[in-house]
Image: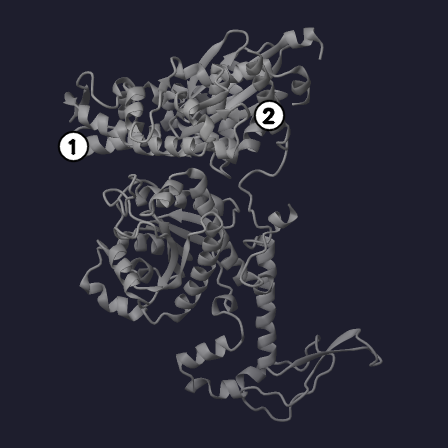
Amino acid sequence: MSRHSDIKKAVLRGVYEDNAGIPRSVDRPGQPKFVAAAPGPAQRSGYRGRVLLVAMLAVVALIGVNFRLVTVDGSGPIAMQVVNRQPLQLPEAPLSALLNPEDDHVLESERPSRLEPPQVLKHAALMTSGDYVTMLTSLGMPMADLFDLKVQTIVIDPGHGGIDPGATGQQGLKEKDVTLDIARRLRDKLAASGDYRVLLTREQDRKVFLKERVAFAKKNRADLFISIHINSLPPGSESVNYVETYYFGPHTDQRSLDLAEKENHDSDYVMGDFREVIARIGDTLKTEESKELASSIHTNLFNDLKRRNRDLIDAGSKTGPFMVLLGVEVPSVLVEVSCISNKAEEARLGRPEYRDSVADFLEAGIVEYLQRRAYPETIEGGKTQNVAQQER
Amino acid sequence: MSPSKKDKMLYVGIDLGTSRSVVSASNGNRKWVESYVGWPKDFVAKKMLGKRVLFGSEAQEHRLALNLSRPLQNGVIKEGTERDDAAVHELIGHLIELAGVGPDDEVCVAVGVPAEALKVNKIAIRNAVSDHARKMMVVSEPFSVAYGLGTLDNAMIIDIGAGTVDFCIMHGTVPTEEDQRSLLMAGDYVDEQLLKLLTEKHPEADFSLNTVRKFKEKHGFVGEPKRRVKIEAPVDGKFTEFDITEEMRKACESPMPAIVETVIDLIASFDPEFQESVRNNIIVAGGGSQLSGLDSFLGEATKQFASCSFTCISDPLYAGADGALELATDMPEEFLEKL
């Protein structure tokens, strides 16, 4: 009786201590975990401003005008002058006619004695689309950044569903249920920042053809597409557990070909789509961004899951011929989170807290990719600084 | 706090569940409500319903005119969902109102929530309660059940709810994360399975999640059926009888492998010296514990690993709220004062 009373006292003290530790008024849960994560409106306007500045400077450079700061007496920087350091290189008539030598803003100007077309414009008529790509990429920033292509809509695609359960674990856990739950959690986490519209290709346990998933992403003008799957290995390999992430491209090994064949099954695509399929394979901008996205997601997911499972294998971020990735015209990846055929992993996937962690890691990868696009200099060694964690 | 002050305190225990929320108060009031909260969609709906917010079956009944929320879907408040946060706030206020708080009563509330919500939404729940009571504590649902039953040492509580199945090992202290597990394959999952099985077998009949949930609550069983399960469902508007015994068994047994696995896993993680005591003291609570034949089914299913003894509690609806009430009442004054 006395022992029971002691236990009760200890339990009550424990409840008190647990509750006394809860802050009474803090930020609402669901706020972004990464302080410098997804660019907010203010950050974005700064980013836009930077891109605008780059564009303005480029225009100024093109018309051959340079700025320099001089004082009235020429000793220090008080007023801004526009001067020509060298003969203005402009196309002959139309553009030079736009320059008004009487402009009030021009404190001092020298009109060129002779106008010559700049080299880049002189050859413009002869440039091919490949040359344009070379020219744009030589500026040292991704094309998506140069054109200030923002990410507004993220489509998350929970693999399988309905009568298509996907892989099934030894204890009966189905891939379709796990992918849907992780996708829902990921959606809620990404949407909490308020910066993105986040949509799921399926909200319920229902069959959705690959073609419908692609059509959904197109219809909703997706900017990013993330397909979530769980792997399964044949009998005899139950002890193996690995993470792998794909973006569209040729298969790198037989296993990725087999996997693509499995995931492409029942795609509802017909041979008539073949021409379009082939035409899209050369889509370099999408491939470049997909590769970045896949790498970011994979690195975060593997590194964080590895802490919970020392036997986890890194199968890498690589290309694979997945139809669902090919059809979507924006950066897109397919994540095989882990192997449900591994009994211990199946047990882990059955726990909500583990699935929530997986969603956290996927979120971190996506956020890091977005942040890298917005602030390339803030990412060191490919890892986002989790400021919240550091502060703790 | 003076003794007289404590005497004037109204203690309230709340079980905030995915499907049902229950309140039990020290003045003897015990009430429950389905965990639905709805706000009229527009001015017309507000005028027609004559209320700012509706709860439970009334909210469900008028769902077409309401923005309806079931805030603890899947056992947690969805993060960043303002409507669900607001729904929890309203629901707790409503339950405290049902407890019959007097104008001069000082209220002390203990809220039991699904284990996952305690982990994810602790602050949100605390904030929701703080507008209605100054003194409060939030605990996990299986823990409040254990406290109410007095099974604080060498026992396991399995709380089979609608959103989650929560497992908790008690060993004389407040359970930590390692002592707890949660599964998503709970009551709602069984309903979905049953609906799917019935729709596949009888595509001509008109079933809905609500109707199959009622079938389950009335006829749910695992193992061998005691009698055939016969229900009526509309076919082209005409009620027709169907024998759904097999579908009911399959759906109700669908989460059992995962439950058995988790029981074994949790016991295995416990100190070997006390594993036998835990195996012989497994309490099953929550709405799911009302499935007919559950205790013997689980006992049989775990036999291949180790002999376990399962007991389904007699009053699953109020066990959580009663446990929370007892916790609030037992909390020493010096602790209460600081909460």
Q: Are marks 1 and 2 on the same chain?
A: no
Q: Tell me the residue that label 2 is attached to.
A: A14
Element class at badge 2: helix
Q: Amino acid at mark 1?
A: Lys
Look at discs 1 and 2 and give the one toward the viewer: 2
Q: Amino acid at mark 2?
A: Gly
Which of A121 and B14 lies nearest the eye of the viewer?
B14
Q: Tell me the residue that label 1 is attached to.
A: B201
Q: Does residue B67 show up?
A: no
Residue A346: x and y, percent?
35, 43
Residue B63: x and y, percent?
37, 26
B37 is higher (above) or lower (below) than A361: above
Residue A20: x and y, percent?
64, 28
Q: Which colour style is shown?
A: one colour
Which of B22 and A229 lies nearest the eye of the viewer?
A229
Disc 1 chain ID: B
Q: Label 2 neighbourhood size at 10 Å, few (<14), some (14-19), many (20+)?
A: some
